[in-house]
Each structure stands twice: as C-alpha cells, then as structure tokens.
Amino acid sequence: MSQFGYPRPQLVRQHWTSLNGAWRFMYDDERRCELPGCADGWTHEINVPFAPETKNSGVGDTGFHTFCWYQRDFTVLSGAGRTILHFGAVDYRARVWVNAHLVAEHEGGHTPFSADITDVLRDDGAQVVTLFVEDDPHDLAKPRGKQDWLLEPHSLWYPRTTGIWQPVWFEQVASTYIHTLRWTPVFETYEIGCEILATGEIHENLFVEVKIWHGKELLADDHYKLLGHEATRKIALSDPGIDDSRNELLWSPERPTLLEAEVTLYHNGEVLDRVTSYTAMRSVSINRDRFMLNGRAYPLRLVLDQGYWPDTLLTAPSDVALKRDVELAKAMGFNGVRKHQKIENPRYLYWADKLGLLVWEEMPSAYRFSPKAITRMVREWTEAIERDYSHPCIIVWVPFNESWGVPNLTLTQAHRSAVEALYHLTRTLDATRPVIGNDGWEASATDILGIHDYDCDPERLGPRYAVTDPVRTLFDQRRPGGRILTLDGFPHRGQPIVLTEFGGIAYDPKASAMRTWGYARAHTADSFIGLYRSLMAVVNNTLMFSGFCYTQFADTFQESNGLLCADRTPKVPLEQISAATRGILYEPKEEEQAGLGSG
C-alpha cells in the first residue's frame, strides 16, 4: 500500500488506501488561479509526500514560492459507509476540495488533519482531490523550525519545506466509528487508562470491547457502554508484586515491551468499527535532582537529531529509513534522542516505541514575537500533544528552545508570560510527563533545567560543572551564549540538570576543512573520536548532570558536526562511538567493522 506503512500506528484499520505518488502540481505566485484551481495550468508532476524543494519530489525548486496547487484523481465508490481523507502534514496553510467542493481548511505545518468527504463523492467512483497551499517563506511569525527565510541556507537554518511532506491516505468506515484512542499508563496502581471517542450518527446503545495482550497472554478483555460517544476507563492489570516478574511488563529502552491492543465498537451487537493499537506500562517523573523511569533514577544519554535527509529534507525517504535512524541511535550507545525543532513523523515514534528509544518532542519555533505568533504556536502545539500523547517513547515536552521567538525574556514580561503559559498549558494537557519551558538558558517555569554549552575543551567544561554550590557559582553567573541560566524570580529549585546541547565537533571525511562547520573541528578520524571520548568522559562523570544530549546525530547540510555523515554513514566505527557514549573503555575486536554491528 505504501512505502511508509500505515501512517497512524496507534489507531490502525486493516483497509486503507494510500494517495502517495504522482500528483499534478503548479506554482501560483501571482495568484491567477480561480478556486479550486486551474484545470489546464498544471506545469509539474510531483511525487507526494516529498516537498517540491526536494530532489525526490521530481520538482527540486528551492526558490521563493508562496502559493501552490496539487491535484490528483482517485477512485472510491460511494455508499460504503463514510470515507475519511487524511493528510499527515501540509506546510503551512491548506484548503482542500474534493470534486470541486471545499471539504477542509487547516493551518499549521507539522500536524495532521482529516475530512469526511462522503457527501461529495461521485457515484461513478471517479474522484478528484485538489489542494491549495499558502506558505510564505518570509513569515517569521509562524512555527517554522529550522526552515530558512533566506534564499540559500545560512548559519543554523536549512532548506524550506512547502506543501505536503507527510503521507496522504483515505479509509472507509461505518456511519459511526472510533475517532480518537488515548492510552495513559498508571504505574503506581498498575493500570492502563483508556479514553475512546466515537463520532457519527448513532448516539445510543454503543459499546466498546477493549482487549490487551502481552505477547500471546490476554491481560484484559473489558466491555464498556459509551456515554454519548465517549468512554473513559482504567484497565487494571495483574501486578505480580515481585520486581523481576513486574519488569517483564515494563517498557524501557533496554526492554521495550509493548502491549498489543484491539478496540471494537458495537451497536446492538453489530460490529461498527475495529482498530488495532498498542500501549506500554511505563512512567516518567522527576524526583529531586534525578530523572526517573519506572520509579528508578535513569541517566539520560541523548543525541540531538534534526530529522533531515539530503534528498528529501524533512520527509524520510521511506519507513525503512526511519527505522534505521532509531537503530543507529541505539547502536551509538544512546538511549534517547532530542528531536530538534521538528514534530516527527508518527512512524518514527512507532519504531522508537517498538525498538526502545526515548524521545524529547520539541515545538518548531517562530522567530518573531507577536500575539499572532503565540496563537499559532498554541494551536499547533496542542494538536501535536494530542497526536503523540499515547506514544510511550515520548518522555519530555519542550515548547521553546534557546528563547527563539521570545528573545527578550529578561526584559519583556509578555515574553516571559508566553513561556510560562506554554509550560502550564502543556502540563495541563499532559500531567504525566516533565516539561521544559525554555531549553538552553533563561529558564523560568520548567521541570528540568536544560543547559547548552558548546565549549569543547574538556579541561574547561569539567571544572565548570564540578561545583559544590551551583546556585552561587553557576546560576548567578553568565554562561554560554551570554545568557543567564535562570530568570529572576525562578531560582534553581533542585530540578534535574541536563546538558541538553554540547559537542558539535565538525569532521567531514568526504570534504575539505573549509566546507565543514561546527563548534570545534577535527581533521582526522582519530582526533574526532579522541575529542568525543574526552567530552563524554566529562559528562558521564559529572554528578551534577542527570543526563546529556550530544550535538548531533548526523551532518545536516552546512553543519558537518554529526557522528554520522548526512547519508548515515558512520564517521568512525559505531562500536567506538557506543563505548565513548556509555563512558566505558573501548576494546577493539579482532575483526572490527564500521557497519551497524550488533547494535
């Protein structure tokens, strides 16, 4: 059906149809087309879901374009229940017509939207979907992450992404069907919270059956009546009461145990809808200065991951590529990633859930402060949390990074209020995970204090954080970036301290030194791994830190400071990187290889 697999991995239906592939495409920079599009004006064929800026799209135009159109034919017969059209993500503002009828409008470049298109389908089965996209490349008041507003990528920013960049598909459902499924593990009482929202025509005598398995063992088989269209229950699991047995059901990077689930919707005994899903028993919390996983202190070993590919930008080349990125992070000794300035494809989160990799989810920044910018951010961030709430891999939410979009936190109350508001909103929408209000510096409302420090001299970095009184010697002084670590009125209250950006060693074995960029430079593989080992020795042995996040996973355009090349080729053997990451002595094997190894 699709090289990406079912696009929504925690609410899966057996029958669905991918609309990825060839679409008609055109730019409309001067807005000459009448809604819903120019029937004879198509200038390109584009390969969805790859953005027109990418090589794999078949367009490959990286210039400035504000308006564009998409169109394709598809086939679906009417009269077979309801037909729902889904878009994974369209950057930035989209309007959708089916058979010349407006069916959906959505603003926000990183979150999904859907439309019930049943009432506009043609009886003969031949359908046409048309999409109009507005994406102003110069608009700094919209959440845009690392997308550059200059013609050529500069500094820390990368090529733009316009239009469709995640999968498009449709599925047919009954007149009443399961719309939302949300899982909440309750570690303390060994329960799984289950929230089900149905939608459609029927309002009475709706029941759901929820089954949960651990492998072949059926753990729960519960039946509930929906009140209106909703059901909210806690499903009790049998607690063995012994740590070794209990741990068999707990999810962690070391043992990513997933609990398979099936939810069936009934009306008067007739099956209306059936979906498969999964959840996990795990908890994340803060206990004084430590990050806790499943009630135990857990050192975080994260790597910063921009989530870009050379020929496809924000879109992964395939589902295999997403899985491979998870495997590579683990093979390099990391137990998690900080997805930087990107709401990642749910298929990546699926592989992180399945293979065992922690994920920090971070909201893509706007770069101009205004009420409009904050309104946009709140709406899209709310949608992102709703989409990803049930993924066990996600352990931290990060609304702001390095004061981007709120540049005057020390002086402007409105900027400070924005960070505090987003922190409290996030904690309201999800009370089960820690939140970092503003990562890097100038912290106010936060559950973890994240510090960014790109000093690559281990002899300076170590003593800086080997202090006995951090409040006096660290937080009252100016630090990296010329920024204070905590704002007035928000002293360090004992939260965990995580070095959330450091390193950034530039080394490109395929290019001259003049083409590389990073916070430090290595000229040989030996010097690269030597400096990496020295930095990791510091952060692994600094008692102040509850964890770290190294910059970065892979080279990204002008930044050559990845542990991997942009094509994911390791710069040094993965076994050497893994040993250094974990702070253990590397012992060369007799037949060492630079491939993935045992991972």
Image (cartoon, helix red, strand yellow):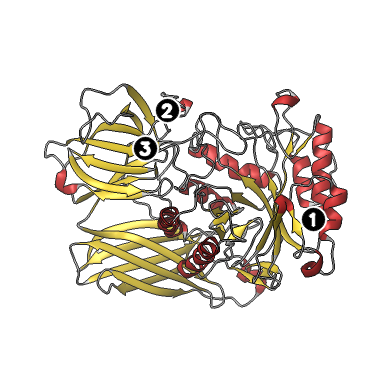
Q: Residue at x 58, y 40 (%)?
A: 324
Residue 77 in view here: yes
Q: CA distance from mark 1 to mark 3?
A: 45 Å
Q: CA distance from mark 1 to mark 2?
A: 43 Å
| Lateral position of residue 474 relative to residue 261, left or right | right
Nearer mark to the viewer, of 3 and 2: 2
Looking at the picture, tell me which residue is in the foreground, 455 or 566.
455
Q: How many neighbours does mark 2 have within 10 angstroms: few (below 14), some (14-19), or many (20 or more)?
A: many
Residue type, mark 2 in image: Ser
Q: Residue at x 56, y 61 (%)?
A: 412
Residue type, mark 1 in image: Asn
Looking at the picture, tell me which residue is in the foreground, 422 or 324.
422
For mark 2, what is the residue?
Answer: 57
Q: How many neighbours does mark 3 have within 10 angstroms: few (below 14), some (14-19), or many (20 or more)?
A: few
For mark 1, what is the residue?
Answer: 540
What SS does tag 1 mark? helix
- The C terminus lies in which quarter of the figure? top right
Among the two numbered marks 1 and 2 on one chain, the one whose residue lies closer to the N terminus: 2
Q: Position of residue 396 (x, y in %)?
A: 57, 60
What SS does tag 3 mark? loop
Question: Quarter-wise, where is residue 21 in the image?
Answer: top left
Q: CA distance from mark 3 to mark 2?
A: 19 Å
Q: Position of residue 480 (x, y in %)?
A: 73, 52
Residue type, mark 3 in image: Met
Numbered mark located on residue 1 in the image: 3
Q: Position of residue 436 (x, y in %)?
A: 59, 62
Among the two numbered marks 3 and 2 on one chain, the one whose residue lies closer to the N terminus: 3
- The N terminus lies in which quarter of the figure? top left
What SS does tag 2 mark? helix
| Lateral position of residue 248 relative to residue 493, left or right | left
